[in-house]
Amino acid sequence: MDTLKEAGLPNVVGWEVKDPAPPVVVVCPALPAVETGVNGVTHGKPFMTHWLVQIVAGRGSASATRNALNDMVARTVIALRPFMIGIEVETPKVTDPEEGKPQYLGAEIAASIAIDMKEE
């Protein structure tokens, strides 16, 4: 999350934040969150963790929202590349509006990172 904030992304929050206001970048664990059955990853060695970065652009004109989303996706990918592998960006999506709430344009980025998990 700090890496994304340093990249200039607005409103970077964790998945536990309820109803964050767009524009927002939400970082949450993917399934599986922690994986040990990866080549080169064994018990006692680095574990592979998988993450989703959900981006929801703010409201505005179609072109302004699209440009904001493109900028947020580019900043996210550039920020994650030195640290994470398997970065995949899904096609942009339009959120389903709830009653009385607007639609938003967004995208989802999947990425993984190997970490050391040591007993403390």
Image (tube, rainbow, N blue to C red):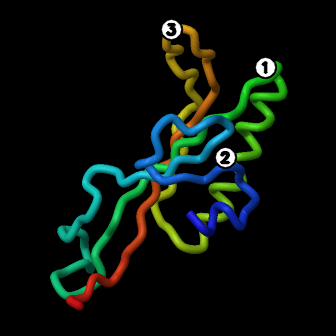
Q: Residue at x 52, y 41 (%)?
A: 108
Assign a secondary structure to mark 2: helix
Q: Position of residue 42 (x, y in %)?
A: 19, 81
Q: Quadrant of the C terminus?
A: bottom left
Choose mark 3 or mark 1, whichever is in front.
3
Quadrant of the rendered image containing residue 57? top right
Disc 1 marks which amino acid? Ala
Q: Residues within 10 Å of mark 3 (few under 14, many from 20)?
A: few
Q: Position of residue 62 (x, y in %)?
A: 78, 19
Q: Which residue is mark 2?
A: 73
Q: CA distance from mark 3 to mark 1?
A: 21 Å
Assign a secondary structure to mark 3: loop
Q: CA distance from mark 2 to mark 3?
A: 28 Å
Q: Quadrant of the N terminus?
A: bottom right
Q: CA distance from mark 2 to mark 1?
A: 16 Å
Q: Residue at x 28, y 50 (%)?
A: 31
Quadrant of the rendered image containing residue 86? bottom left
Q: Of marks 2 and 1, which one's residue comes earlier in the chain?
A: 1
Position of residue 60 in the picture relative to residue 13 (left or right): right
Which label sits on residue 99? 3
Assign a secondary structure to mark 1: helix
CB contact under 8 Å: marks 2 and 3:
no
Q: Of marks 3 and 1, which one's residue comes earlier in the chain?
A: 1
Q: Residue at x 62, y 68 (%)?
A: 3
Which label sits on residue 62? 1
CB contact under 8 Å: marks 2 and 1:
no
